[in-house]
Amino acid sequence: MAHIREGIDEEKKACFTLDDQGVLWFKNRLVVPKDMELRKKILDEAHTSVLTMHPGSNKMYQDLKQKFWWIRMKREIAKVKADHLKPAGMLQPLDIPAWKWEDVHMDFVVGLPRTQKGYDSIWVIIDRFTKSGHFLPVKTDYRANTYAELYIAKIVSLHGVPRTITSDRGSVFVSRFWEQLQNALGTKLIHSSTYHPQTSGQVERVNQIVEDMLRACALTYSTKWDECLPLAEFAYNNSYQKSLNMAPFEALYGRRCRTPLNWSESGNSAQSRQKSYSDMRRRPLVFEKSDHVYLRVSPMKGVHRFGVKGKQAPRYVGPFKITEKCEPVAYRIELPPHLAAMHDVFHVSQLKKCLRVPEEEVDTSQVQIEPDLTYEARPIKILDQKQRSTRRNTINFYKVQWSDHFEEEATWETEEYLQTKHQGFLPSTSNEYVRTS
């Protein structure tokens, strides 16, 4: 009792009560004595129980304070959480590089939407000395010899042969061919410790920077993010790095690379004007998590049959549920399985609010939507037929109704176009509606 009274003001002392069994209470909370073994059991139970699932220190304190009290209880809980969060194993720092591009880090940014050229990953290669890097678009199905050829063409040609390469352990780098190639070039392949890739933490941070850059590009370019990757690489290398107190280009070349004069001023001015013009034609649109929205689609590029009545073509599909707000004007939506290949984050301009959610799920699989949010309608019915004679030949025309369109939206198409783009649609003989014009 004496040690509990120490350090407690008079106002708090009045909150202590002793019940008939001699148990001390503080505002209906059980006072735990200075028994370290007992306190440890209470803290372990609160932290490891399947009913609590390793809560954070604040949540753990809020749960325990409902039932228990002891001096400096919150501080002890925070210490327990800190001990649990300490990583096992001491960090093994790599030797400081002696010169530029002698020691490099490698890693991959994966899970990106597949581009029109088939790329779905980024190979990130960073010089540990200058922090300069190269970002190469690659495919996950590349074989080891393909990576080796790409490395020699893009890296060795610019910076020479590296002395060491560090990378998170993976199938690409443990392959026998890759190791033999590195040995032939005089390179010692250093792997990170199993399940403890601390040696690659530098590249992991660069990956986060690249992903942030590409997130904005993906919203605009979708399946063409590989086209803006060189500019993302330039932006990274020409930007200030705190660990260097300069930009990677400064460490590599002695100064930053030159950019067009007044880019910042001219760009900001033009961007401001463009924003004011756009805002005059737009209304602020904000969605909440769990809202339902329609997704805007457009006819396939190069398909001109809806040129006259394009406004009557399908413009939205859905509705889909919003699962996350990624940026002030970007949202992640829950896509059905047949659209799984599509990137699930969309700009607000591509969304339309659904005011009333259908009671039954709407089947969107009938509209074959491509990853770039385009679709190509299919001919489903011939409504009429005519011929047009020229000096040299006669051209057959067919009035075609398209999938997801009404009859009044039918368009006239040439026989050659239908046979080329939609083989098997035209019957062997189709003279029922022939009329000459």
Image: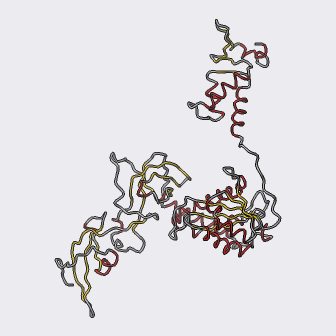
Q: Pick the quarter of the image with the C terminus.
A: bottom left
Q: Which residue sits furthest right?
A: 98
Q: Position of residue 325 (x, y in %)?
A: 53, 50
Q: Position of residue 370 (x, y in %)?
A: 43, 64
- Dividing the picture into quarters, in which one does residue 407 lie? bottom left
- Left/right placement of residue 321 relative to residue 164 reads left
| Residue name at image x 66 percent, y 67 percent | 178
- Left/right placement of residue 375 relative to residue 108 reads left
Count of marks, rendered view: 0
- Dividing the picture into quarters, in which one does residue 236 lie? bottom right
Q: Is residue 58 visible?
A: yes
Relative to 220, does residue 390 appear above or below in the rendering?
below
Frontmost residue, 301 versus 169 = 169
Q: Is residue 247 visible?
A: no
- Left/right placement of residue 127 relative to residue 63 reads right
Q: Position of residue 156 (x, y in %)?
A: 71, 73
Q: Pick the quarter of the image with the N terminus.
A: top right
- Left/right placement of residue 398 relative to residue 285 reads left
Frontmost residue, 173 versus 180 = 180
Relative to 97, does residue 43 appear above or below in the rendering?
above
